[in-house]
Image (spheres, coloured by chain):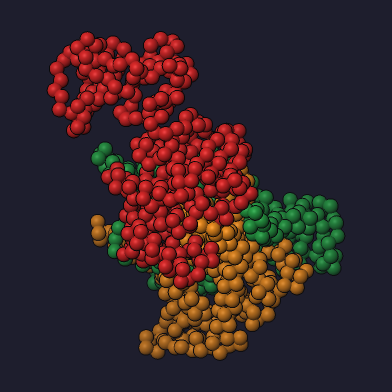
Amino acid sequence: MKRRLALWICLLLVWSLLPMLWQLISSFSTAESLVNGSIPFLQRWTLVHYKELLASDPPFWRYLLNSAIVSALTTVITLALAIPAAYGLARVPLQLRRVLRWITVAAALFPYVLLFLALLELARRFSLGNSLIALAMPYSGLAMPLALLLLTSVFESLPRELEDAARLEGLGLWQRLRWVLVPLLAPATASTAILVFLFAWNEYPIALTWLSRDELLTLPVAMARIAGSSIYSIPYGAYAAATVLGSIPLLLLVLICQRQIVSGLTNGAIKG
Amino acid sequence: MLHLNGLGKRFGEQWILRDLNMQVDEGECVALLGTSGCGKSTALRLIAGLDRQDEGSIELDGEPLDSIPAERRRIAMVFQSYALFPHLSVRENLNLGLKIRGVSPAQRQQRIETVLDTVRLREMADRRPQQLSGGQRQRVALARALLRDPRVYLLDEPMSNLDAQLRDDLRPELRQLILQGTQPVLYVTHDQQEAMALANRIAVLKDGRIEQIGTPEELYKTPASQFVASFIGRPQINLLPVDKQLTIGIRPEDVGFDPEGMPCRLISREWQGASQLLLLDSPRGALRMLCAGDLSLSEPLHVSWLTSAEHRFDAGSGHRLAE
Amino acid sequence: MNLLLLLPALLMIGLVFVWPMIRYGWLSFHANSVLTGLNPVPNGGANWIRLLDDQRFWQDALQTTRFAGVSVGLELLLALAIALLLDQRWRGRGVVRALALLPWALPTTMMALGWRWIFNTPYGPLERLNEFVGLGPLNLLSTPMWTWLVTVVADVWKTTPFIALLLLAGLQTIPKDLYSAFRLEGGRPIQALRCITLPLLMPYVLIALLFRGAQAFGVFDLIQVLTGGGPAGSTESVALYAYLNAMRFLDFGYSATAMLAGFLLLTSAMLILAMLLRLSGLMKPVQP
């Protein structure tokens, strides 16, 4: 019984990690050894892909920085709007709440790639292209339904008496949010923030159409652009190195915050 | 002095509180007694300003409260769940309201220390609420109410989450801390014993309306209806139908042994130490009777009571009939 | 007051989700391409007539649906297995859960690139393995059948962890007492799976099905980077086709029409699915 369990766990890990492991190995392999299996083991390894990546123009870390800027900004804007909204949503009359909830769920389900054209038009009309700050606007809108769903369910689960007690203590609306509700929601807010951040970090079609200047690309677009850059010989070593470098921030995020991510996803599922 | 004038609240078409007229004097404690859903907690929420009444008005010392938001009414409420902020320590829980209300840090510190001594929680001051026992949490809630320096105290089932033993222990404490002040106190409970023990007057609520209001003694001795009669006094009063018009009520403690009385069969008995409760099968129906604990019983039992101890109710409406 | 707090968020949702649909509705009755100098010119229902006749669109719609159906089906099965595994008590469960979650957290385009290398002919690891077997080159990314399978595998790999977590959350709401009681009734573990676990898990399966179904129908990142829709358009999705219409053929009117059509197809598919589920009684929430 124990042995069979261990076997399944190993299988799960192999399935999840092997593709990434292959990238890791490839990223340290010389271009020659990638296409030639007969090169002796000790002569296969190199750091050249990483060096190239960091020395290219713009250097690879620039994409990471861009993604970090957009994602952080998106997270801040989304939460700043979603927290008061979720508070309001948890307190509007039931009938209206049901309607709004349906709209939110529908929006959260929506395959947002279908929105890119209209959003691109907006970007052109208002000259929002090629600006990381502007890109955070549609991102916040796209992440809003999810954030609302997660946070509303938490607001609804808070005992009403806690807020009542705060009112009787003399706390006004913003004071209640500041001193009682937001601190109480800190764990849920953290998990929402991480999910929003992940969304913005991974978003592709909108970034693809909004950004064209090399030094402004976010990580997903940069990766795709490398893929499209050369048709005949694709620099797989450099790719793999880029994949590894691009994964490191997320790897850390997921490993450190896995508890929040899991609880965020789970809450959304149970109550959403 | 707190005045409630024709207070009413409805959810949709359903009135959950109607025609609540009441006056609570300075230093007086009035208990709102009733089963769950009778509107008693709603009354407190209206007074506190947490909900808005649909009719009637609330006055405190002659000043209408209706347009003042809850934050500024200066009314303290102790909740059934205590509603302590789980992310704050005991001290921070007490500090938050004072800080918001602009009390200076030095004064805050001093008042908190004093109140912590009063409720005997000095050692617990840095713990979070979930690290406290039920009784300790309740004392924190009381301390918070005291620090509010309120014009009215509202207590919403403050002891119903505690076990029976603790409740008995806390009752004197509650009396000393809150009921001896000069503010009006409204105390919501479903426990008639608690209401009898703590309140100067009791208002019995049924379906959102006051059934009867009076001192505990008045309620016990002259219940205005069958409902009040069966709510007040334990063991519960016997209600014996006489005919289509009349039901009489007789308290178990008023029933006595009498060789001339009705012959009864003993169905069961609960021995309570000093007393014992007998459940009898009498010609007029099932009958509860209270007698001394050391009495040995031999069947057949004969029982009777004084006519003057009978409460007479209209069988249709349940109202008390004139003597 | 409460509505006021809601307003900014709702406006944002309206701007990002509702406005595009209105705009597409308008654009779909206009020619707006290089031929009109990228200015909208009303053209009646020409876009829609063209769409009805557009073999490529319907081919893509079919391919996308097939892709979504097969991927989501596989994901559900695999995720159920993983969730059952993670629901047991064993040491290091948290770490494994975090590691298993990784594929979901990585950008799709990044791993799409990775898959291109893994399925590369002749240098990718799969073709290398195949050399030992000696079947000759599989041409994983240039044979329609294989390429389609590759996209499914890549999608399953990425999104299974997400569904597994959903289902795990569902599993953890089932009181363990039920299993004890079932055992005392003489039930075997495999019967417990069928009689207790699956029925109680159904609401979560349905949530996952609806959510992932919609997302998979909108597949774009993966296809665009991994196959570019090829070979010979065999993996092209509706979203990619609409994208190409706008960004490569610069025909915005028709692109909007295609996207609106895709949206309508998806919505009606979801409604029919929801109706079928409701009729079959599966949708009823089961309270454990």
Q: In this view, does C46 lie to the left or right of C99?
A: right
Residue A194 versus residue B159 in the image, above or below: below
State the hue of chain A: orange
- C214 sits to left or right of C262: left
Q: Where the N terminus of chain C falls, by quadrant?
A: bottom right
Percent x, y of residue B86? 42, 59
Chain in red on the image? B
Residue A128 at x, y percent in the picture = 72, 72
Work out whether residue B253 or residue A223 is closer to the camera in this orientation and state it: B253
Q: In which quarter of the image is the C terminus of chain C?
A: top left
Q: Position of residue B278 (x, y in %)?
A: 23, 23
- The part of the image, by quadrant, that contains residue C84 is bottom left
State which quadrant residue A22 falls in: bottom left
- The residue drawn where x is 34% and y is 50% is B173
Q: Name the residue at 40% across, 49% down.
A: B180
Front-lying residue, B25 or C159: B25
- Quarter of the image for residue A263 reads bottom left
Evaluate whether residue B7 shows in this view. yes
Q: Which chain is green?
A: C
Residue at left offset 25%, top offset 11%: B262
Say whether residue B243 is left or right of residue B273: right
* Residue C236 vertical position relative to residue B311 in the rendered view, above or below: below
x then y, percent, for residue B147: 45, 59
How many tags in the picture?
A: 0
Confirm whether residue A15 shows in the render: no
Residue ID at (45%, 32%)? B214
